[in-house]
């Protein structure tokens, strides 16, 4: 069937929503807000209404919308060269990878595009490392993952999801994964076998509702991996790059994994940029032809990613996240028992469990949007706050005040 392109004037908010629902697949259920413009922590809809963006593209917008340094890097690169493919070198990838590796304290970077691609890449690398370096018999490699994980949407990744809605109807699934409870280091240690090549974990489970593991868990996982000769792969696609008040969430626990997976904020909210960052021992198992991506490491992505690394090198954003995170936590803690059952925070990142007797997480998000604050629910009763790290202290108060007002209004 063909559709004809209409040339009528600007659409209203509800017309945009209706059009999108008519012509796109229904794999999302957006809030009824049609964004037309955004700067810093604020977005404006097609009717000119302003909202405080407290989702920040699931942390892809850690530096806010249209950060001038990132826009400048993108603009300059747009005029020079945007895509070469890895069939040739480009003059942006080397400097970006050098400085990203240094930021992470690692040797090498493997650039990809989306977070899921970084995870897929790490699975392949860990398996090959297992066969070639650890000596696991061919086809036997196992990877230990945690219940409640979210690592992306590919068929292999959803194979080890514990969320039925992510899996239903998508089998057959990829074998080779063992799921253990999140936060239980003994269970994890018990699951390691001679065939285990890697443990793949989020240092904080974002999608699950900002689930923070017990103190000492990540250090115990690190030790278990070292003892068993297994790679510790930290998926910091959402937790990394400043969000938690440190460059990497692992740092807060004094832990250095073998592999960092990065994405989201690495592209500055402008283009998708992801990376597997690790050591020679791990990434040297890849050889020409064994892995690749048409867009991975393209000069535009590398120029923006390099500018992101430059922002993180200042330490300013990590510091803001830590400082504003204390303010956010203190304010949210006051809501516990007043429509909120529990709050979990790490830096400028919060999971808030709304009392089911009052309303669903979705209803809370809708009412917050009516009050000019954009957030997203996760798994029914939980809402997530992850404002851009450039947000002002007054805006943090504004978001919590709006939530308090929504809860006060209760079922109304
Ligand atoms: C921890 C983690 N890993 C991987 C992904 C997948 O990233 P993408 O949506 O860019 O594929 C996400 C996305 O939310 C994530 O939170």
Image: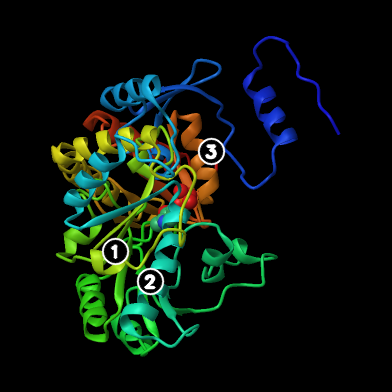
Give the CA distance from mark 1 to mark 2: 9 Å
> How many neighbours does mark 2 have within 10 angstroms: few (below 14), some (14-19), or many (20 or more)?
many
Q: Residue furthest right?
A: 1
Q: Which residue is mark 1?
A: 259
Say the numbered circle drawn on residue 126. 2
Q: Which residue is mark 3?
A: 366
Residue, x 37% and y 22% (percent of image)?
80
Element on which disc 2 rests: helix
Q: Where on the picture, by quarter, is residue 216?
A: bottom left
Tag in front: 2 or 3: 2
Residue 33 in picture, x, y percent from top left: 55, 29
Viewed as shown, does residue 13 lie left or right of 273? Answer: right
> How many neighbours does mark 1 have within 10 angstroms: few (below 14), some (14-19), or many (20 or more)?
many
Residue 43 in picture, x, y percent from top left: 43, 25
Q: Toward the viewer: 366 or 234?
A: 234
Give the CA distance from mark 3 to mark 1: 38 Å
Viewed as shown, does residue 329 lie left or right of 20? Answer: left
Give the CA distance from mark 2 to mark 3: 42 Å
Residue 76's place in the image compared with 216, above or below, is above
Element on which disc 3 rests: helix
Q: Quadrant of the C terminus?
A: top right
Can you see residue 227? Answer: yes
Q: Quadrant of the N terminus?
A: top right
**Disc 1, disc 2: CB below 8 Å?**
yes
Residue, x 15% and y 37% (percent of image)?
316
Q: Earlier along the polypeptide chain: callout 2 or callout 3?
A: 2
Residue, x 54% and y 47% (percent of image)?
362
Residue 396's place in the image compared with 191, above or below, is above
Q: Earlier along the polypeptide chain: callout 3 or callout 1?
A: 1
Q: Earlier along the polypeptide chain: callout 1 or callout 2?
A: 2
**Disc 2, disc 3: CB below 8 Å?**
no
């Amino acid at each position: 069937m063909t559709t004809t392109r209409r040339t009528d004037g600007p659409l209203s908010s509800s017309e945009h929503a209706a059009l999108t629902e008519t012509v796109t697949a229904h794999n999302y259920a957006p809030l009824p807000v049609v964004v037309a413009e955004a700067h810093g922590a604020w977005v404006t809809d097609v009717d000119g209404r302003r909202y405080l963006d407290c989702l920040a593209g699931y942390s892809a917008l850690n530096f806010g919308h249209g950060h001038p340094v990132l826009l400048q890097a993108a603009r300059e690169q747009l005029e020079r060269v945007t895509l070469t493919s890895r069939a040739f070198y480009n003059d942006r990838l080397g400097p970006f990878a050098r400085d990203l590796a240094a930021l992470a304290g690692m040797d090498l970077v493997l650039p990809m595009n989306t977070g899921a691609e970084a995870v897929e890449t790490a699975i392949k690398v860990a398996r090959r490392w297992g066969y070639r370096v650890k000596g696991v018999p061919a086809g036997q490699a196992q990877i230990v993952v945690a219940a409640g994980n979210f690592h992306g949407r590919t068929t292999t990744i959803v194979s080890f999801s514990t969320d039925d809605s992510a899996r239903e109807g998508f089998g057959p699934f990829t074998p080779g994964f063992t799921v253990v409870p999140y936060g239980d280091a003994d269970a994890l240690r018990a699951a390691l076998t001679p065939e285990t090549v890697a443990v793949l974990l989020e240092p904080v489970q974002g999608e699950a509702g900002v689930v923070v593991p017990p103190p000492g868990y990540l250090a115990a996982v690190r030790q278990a991996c070292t003892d068993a000769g297994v790679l510790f792969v930290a998926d910091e696609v959402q937790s990394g790059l400043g969000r938690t008040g440190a460059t990497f969430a692992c740092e807060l626990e004094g832990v250095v994994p073998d592999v960092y997976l990065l994405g989201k904020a690495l592209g500055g909210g402008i283009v998708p940029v992801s990376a597997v960052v690790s050591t020679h021992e791990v990434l040297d198992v890849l050889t020409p032809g064994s892995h690749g991506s048409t867009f991975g490491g393209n000069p535009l992505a590398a120029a923006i990613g390099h500018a992101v690394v430059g922002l993180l090198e200042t330490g300013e954003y990590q510091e803001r996240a830590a400082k504003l995170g204390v303010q956010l936590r203190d304010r949210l803690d006051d809501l516990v028992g007043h429509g909120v059952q529990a709050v979990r925070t790490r830096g400028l990142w919060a999971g808030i469990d709304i009392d089911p007797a009052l309303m669903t997480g979705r209803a809370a998000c809708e009412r917050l949007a009516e009050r000019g604050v954009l957030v997203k629910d996760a798994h029914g009763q939980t809402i997530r706050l992850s404002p851009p790290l450039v947000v002002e202290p007054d805006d943090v108060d504004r978001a919590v005040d709006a939530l308090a007002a929504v809860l006060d209004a209760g079922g109304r």
